[in-house]
Amino acid sequence: MNKDTQFVRFASYGFLKNLRFFEPFIVLFFREQGLSFLQIGTLFSVREIAINFFELPTGIIADLYGRRISMVLSMVSYIISFLCFYFFPNFYLYIGSMVLFALGEAFRTGTHKAMILEYLRLTGQEDKKIEYYGATRSFSQLGSAINSLIAAALVFYSGTYKMVFLVAVIPYILNLLNLATYPKTLDGDIKKTSKKESMKAFFQIFRSRYSLKGLFNSAFFDSFYKTVKEYLQPILESTALALPFFTFLSAQKRTSIVVGVVYFVLYLLTSYASKSSWKIAKLFGGKERALNITYVFGAFAIILAGVFNSGMLRIVSVLLFIALFVIENARRPMNIAYLSDTIAHTTMASGLSAESQLKTLIGAVLAPILGFLADKFGVGMALAIMGLGMLSLYIPAKLKRVDNQSISSA
């Protein structure tokens, strides 16, 4: 695997992109603003629906007119969204902020991964997909680890969760400059592929049972993971307030310390997991079997995290959440490698956008349901129900080994 200048730029993108200082506190921020779990779930659902609406056209735009411009537009949308969250604290205005955030997500998801895969194709490193993507993703998780400490410090010293949105603008401006100067070759074959050919190749994805199974396995796991992962924050808040430490500090400052430390350790582990993804695939005898096994492990982690969310057993719940984060980041490079084996490189951005579109559609349904269940029965019961729902979808998500002969006959 060649770690040249472009590898550094790919890694820098991931590191800067994950400096989302609001992320460890997003649910707590909304709760501070007086929102119910159902309202929070509604906002997350709006985000997912908007991503779903924007996903396909932005993916096709990236394949037809250039991936670099798509990534630049993504950063611009994010920056405007962060500023809106900071300056306009109102539930209905948050809906608009979420739509802007969703536009940024839609322009980004699939597109940067397609640029990495294009680079591997051009440099003859296609056999290193899991290792290369896992290594670049490990820097994203390292960014999340650093992000947790900086975010905790911002909340601790400012005394409000609001400040994290304003400061997040800085790394996103730096990333905009990084992406704007990527080499033109990473735009893909935009002059060689007609719109008709691109659309035909895109819809071919859904005719292959292998690519369809890959989409299901990735989207089902990621949508449940993305829906439940933010609920680690209220669990950590309850844990922080129950601990006999720093009792002289305000509840918010005590929470910021616990959240910052836990997320820092968590993302160091996910960084290692992402970097070691290829080893896990090898350990289980191939990426398909590894993805099947980790799917089941992830579902049980969510179920048990809900079961143990009570009293001092919340520590076990926190550990299970950490395990879920680690599993997700060990899986992701394998998911990308599997999908890239079944999707034409000329439509990689739109193909990966289809994967993201499916998971956001599922997430749009799950987010308000989880919020309603959390308000009605408590966070623990809501998580257990989500985990059981995820487990029930295992059969359509179960993968079979992919080879060239099976792909050609699919």
Image: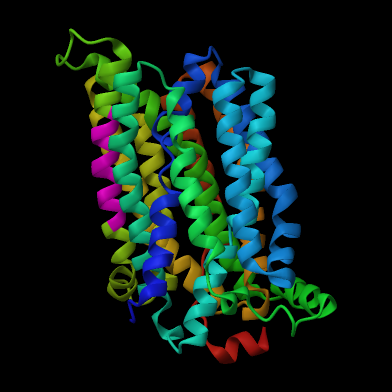
Question: In what quadrant of the picture does the C terminus appear?
Answer: bottom right
Which is nearer the eye, 404 or 171?
171
Q: In this view, does 25 lie above or below 254?
A: below
Query: Quarter-wise, where is residue 164 in the image?
Result: top left
Question: Which quarter of the picture shows residue 138?
Answer: bottom left
The residue positioned 18% from the left and 7% from the top of the image is 248
Q: In this view, does 345 lie above or below 162?
A: below
Q: Residue at x 64, y 26 (%)?
A: 94
Question: Residue 302 in the image: x percent, y percent?
Answer: 40, 40
Q: Is residue 69 above or below residue 80?
A: below
Name the outermost residue toward the left.
Answer: 245
Determine the residue positioned at 65% across, 89% down: 408
Residue 29 image point, x, y percent: 47, 22
Q: How many labels does the image show?
A: 0
Residue extending farthest to the bottom is: 405
> Is 101 on the left-hand or right-hand side of 162?
right
Asked whether 268 falls inside the magenta stretch, the response is yes
Q: Which colour scheme is used?
A: rainbow
Q: Is residue 401 left or right of residue 368?
A: left
Boundaries of the magenta span: 259-271
In the image: residue 91, left or right of residue 15: right
